[in-house]
Image (cartoon, rainbow, N blue to C red):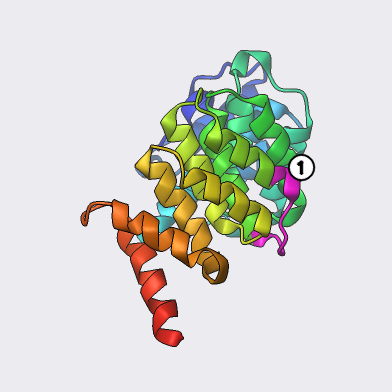
Amino acid sequence: MTLGYWERHGFDDPAVAADRDELIKSADQNPDRCAAFRNLLRSGRRDAVCTALEYFHYEDRQARWGFGNPLDEYAGEVLDRARWVLRGTPLPAARGQDRASALWAIQNHAEAADAPLITAALRAVDGDVVDDGAVSAAGQCLYACDVPEDGELVAQLGAMALDEDRPLRVRVACAGALASAESDQAAEIAVRLTDVPERELQLAGALVLTAHLDTHRPLLERLVATWPPNTPQADDIRDALAEVGDEV
């Protein structure tokens, strides 16, 4: 396993370093990872807490193999500590890795109330390591929001998705996060995305608009007709059009 940046971080407290090292031991060394994780999470030190958050993110990723996250009982505490990290002063030497660890840790656990913190994180970055984690957490946050969703978060994702100076990867991720939003505000941004030349952004915008077929069906039908038959993800849009059409 890996703790990313924190695996090489130089802790000034030997006990904290020992807990970090416990997390990265191989299974045949019988590590007491749960105790080490708790110690780091509850340490009150930004670097130690971020190490615990990175480990929680690692276990969340491993859960996709069907084993679940053995640290799920600490999800509420992880969310609280991630918020603490995001509200605090970043570690200059970490170059965004501390915020990234916090955001990745809550990518499956963010709540509607986290919108201001996630929006602030998105505004603070420009293609650094926080982008992916912030966008992933933003999507979960929007999913947890009632409609209409947090307007500032939706606007920030839209601005980044439409920003031609940003890497296409970042723009597509931001547009994809908007798929968790169903508000008219998100639909207005999505319409603009369907008019850009990059097909990946058109697809992301079209996916948002599948929640607004009563007002945007003609636009989607015209757009789908311009895509080659083998366009990735285009079938999702076609299926949405066909399902609703069958109900009418």
**Element under label 1?**
helix
**Residue 245 position within the rendered picture, expressed as x and y whole percent measured from the top left:** 41, 79
Question: Could you say which quadrant of the image residue 153 lies in?
Answer: top right
Residue visible at 36% across and 43% down? 199
Residue visible at 61% across and 35% down? 159
Whether residue 93 is visible to the viewer of this picture, yes or no, is: yes
Which quadrant holds the N terminus? top left
* Residue 175, magenta (yes or no): no
**Residue 108 position within the rendered picture, expressed as x and y whole percent measured from the top left:** 57, 54
Residue visible at 42% across and 47% down? 202
Check the image and name the residue furthest to the top.
Answer: 93
- Decide if residue 120 is on the left or right side of residue 50: right
What residue type is disc 1 on?
Answer: Pro
Check the image and name the residue furthest to the bottom.
Answer: 247
- Secondary structure mostly seen in magenta is loop
**Residue 132 position within the rendered picture, expressed as x and y whole percent measured from the top left:** 51, 36
In the image, 125 versus 238, the foreground residue is: 238
Q: Which residues are magenta?
A: 144-153
In the image, 17 versus 247, the foreground residue is: 247
Q: Which residue is mark 1?
A: 116
